[in-house]
Image (tube, rainbow, N blue to C red):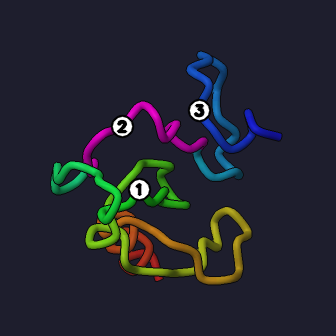
Amino acid sequence: AFSDVYDMGGAEQQDPSKPPRWVPDDSVNECSSCKDAFTLVRRKHHCRSCGGIFCGKCSSQTVPLLKYDILKNVRVCDVCYAKVMAEM
């Protein structure tokens, strides 16, 4: 369901066994990491681990997210990539 993926701003507690809800696309105009503005060329990408929105440069890594039972490689931001690799 849409509300299972996107953060609708509710105050309910997130299930820790599921990935965080994604930040809605229209609520962000710049990369959450490097602060570069999004354009037609610089696209928005959601980190599958934290749900934040990043540019391609700051979310170029892919890893499985075993804590969420995601076994295939998925896009993650650089910060989450470092955390996942440190846990391996």
Label 3: few (<14), some or many (≥20) within 10 Å?
Answer: some
Residue furthest out toward the front? 40
Which secondary structure, mark 2?
loop
Label 2: few (<14), some or many (≥20) within 10 Å?
Answer: some
- Is 28 colored magenta in this rendering? yes
| Residue for badge 1 | 44
Label 1: few (<14), some or many (≥20) within 10 Å?
Answer: many
Residues in magenta, as a range: 21-32
| Residue for badge 3 | 7
In the visual, does 18 lie left or right of 41? right
Image vertical order of residue 12 relative to residue 46, above or below: above
Q: Nearer the viewer, mark 1 or mark 3?
A: 1
Image vertical order of residue 10 relative to residue 68, above or below: above
Majority secondary structure of magenta residues: loop
**What separation in Å lies between label 1 and label 3 (alpha carbons)?**
16 Å
Tag 2 or tag 3, which sits nearer the N-term?
Answer: 3
| Residue for badge 2 | 28
**Image point 36% across, 69% down: which residue?**
59
Quadrant housing residue 21: top right
Tag 1 or tag 2, which sits nearer the N-term?
Answer: 2
**Image point 73% across, 33% down: which residue?**
3
